[in-house]
Image (spheres, rainbow, N blue to C red):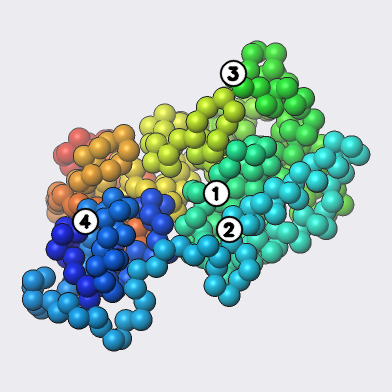
Amino acid sequence: MKKTISLSKLKPGMKVVGIDKSWLETPFLSHHFVIRSEKDIDKLRDSGVQLVTVEVDDLTIEQRPSEEPRDEPHGLQELPAEDSGNDRTILSLQKETTRLLTRAFQQVRINGFLPTDEIRSHVRQTVDFLLHNRHAISLLADIHENDDETYVHSANTMFMAAAFAIRHQMEDAECFRWALAALLHDVGKTRIPEHILKKPGPLDLLEWEVMHQHPIYGFQILRKSPDPEIHGLAAQVAVEHHERLNGSGYPHHLGLDAVHPVSRSLMVLDIYEALTGHRVYRARSSPRKVIHYLMNDYSDRVSVPVILELASMVGIFPVGTFVENEDGEILMIQKYEDAENYRGEMTVLKIFGPGKKILPRPQKRKIPNLDPTTILRTYDYRAVGLTQEQWEYLMGGGAPGIT
C-alpha cells in the first residue's frame, strides 16, 4: 500500500513512489527510488520537498527497517550531465538544432530555399533520441536560453511536439511529421525585418500588420520545397498556427474546425513554449502560471482537450480537470490551496469508482498532492459524459442530475 508522510519521517530503506512537486521542479531523474542514506533525504529537503509518498507493508512507518535493501539497486539519482549510453543530451540537441536553424534560415533569407536533407536528418535524430530516452522529455521546461529567440523557440517547440506525439503513442513516422512541422512553423519570420523581431517592447499597429504576415510567408517558402512532408503538412501548419477558435486569429481568421488537427495541437504548444521562454521584452513565466493562463484566459481561443493533454504531459492538473488513476477511478480537481499556481493541498471529487462506474454521489476528499506517474489520462467534462451545467455545479461543490 501507499502512504503519504512528511519528510521528517522518511528513513533510509524506504521506497519513495511520489513527492509533492512536479518532476519539472526537481533535479532528479525519477520520483521512484529507494532512500539509500541520509544524504538522499538531504537532497530532497534542499529541493523544497515536504511530503513524500512511500510504499509500506503491514508494518507501521516507525517499524520499517532502516537497513539498506539488497534487492533495490537504484537510489536517488540527480539528472546526469549526459545521458548514459548516449553522447547527446536534450540541451546539446537544442544547441545543435539552434545552429542548424541559424544556417537554414539564413539560407532562406539569401535564396528562399531550405536545406531539406539536413533538416530531415536532424529531426529524425531528435525523434529517435526522444523515443529511446523518454526520461529526457522531463527536461523540456529547463532548456530555455537567451539566444536568438526565433531559433530557440522553434527548436523547443519541435521537442514539445515530438514529446506530445510520442505520449499519444503515434507511429514513429507520425512523430517525425509533427516534429518537422513544429521546427519549421516560424520560418516565415525570415522575411520579417530584424528591428521588428527583436524590438525590446510592444509592437505598434503597423509593426503588428507586418508581423501578421509571417504565417503567409512561411507557407510560401515551404510550398516551394520538393519534399512532400514540407510542402504539405509543414506548410499548412505554418499558415494555420496563429488561427484561433473564435476566429480572432490570423492570417485568415479561421475557426479550429477549419484547420488541420496537427495545427490545433501545435498552436497550444507554440503558445506554451513562447510564454515559458525568455523574450527581450518580458521575463519567462512558470509552467504552472502558463497552464493557468491557458485554462482560465485563453480557453475560448484554443482546444481545451489539448491544453489538458499538455498540462498532463508537464505534470500539472488545472482546476476542473478530470483525471483517471491506475485504479480506473476518475477524479475532478476542484480546488488548490494556492489556486493561481496549482500548489498546496488539493480538493478532489471522485466521480467514477473502479472500472469507471459512476458513483451515486461525488465523494469529496482532500489530498496533499497528486503523483503524475499514477495518472493514466486526463479529460474535460464532455469526455466523461457531463453537461456544462453539471460541471459548473461540481466546480462549486454540488452535483445536479448525477445519479
Real-space CA distance between mark 3 and mark 2, rounded to the nearest whole angstrom: 32 Å
Give the tally of numbered discs.
Answer: 4
**Distance Cα–Cα, label 4 vs label 3:** 42 Å
Query: Percent from the top left, x then y, of residue 205?
Result: 65, 13
> According to the image, label 4 marks what residue?
51
Q: Nearer the viewer, mark 3 or mark 2?
A: 2
- Say whether disc 3 or disc 1 marks the residue closer to the N-terminus: 1
Task: Assess disc 1: are there few (<14), some (14-19) or many (≥20) residues with their C-alpha within 10 Å of its C-alpha.
Answer: some
Question: Extreme bottom residue here?
Answer: 70
Q: Are marks 2 and 1 in contact (CB under 8 Å)?
A: yes
Mark 2, residue position:
90
Q: CA distance from mark 2 to mark 4?
A: 29 Å
Left or right of 392: which side holds 151?
right
* Residue type marked 1: Ile
Q: In the displayed image of the protein, which residue is found farthest to the right?
A: 111
Do labels 4 and 3 touch, CB within 8 Å? Answer: no
Q: Which badge, 4 or 1, comes first in the chain's sequence?
A: 4
Can residue 2 be seen here? The reply is: no
Q: Position of residue 14 (x, y in %)?
A: 22, 73
* Residue 106, horizontal then vertical, whole percent: 82, 40
In this view, the residue in front, 293 or 55, is 55
Residue drawn at (42%, 29%), measured in percent from left and top? 297
Indicate which disc residue 202 carries.
3
Q: For the residues carrying marks 3 and 1, which lies nearer the camera in this image? A: 1
Query: Which of disc 2 and disc 3 is earlier in sequence?
Result: 2
Crowding near the residue tagged with mark 4, few <14, some 14–19, many ≥20 C-alpha atoms within 10 Å: many
Q: Which element type, helix, strand or loop, lies under badge 4?
A: strand
Q: Secondary structure at mark 1?
A: loop
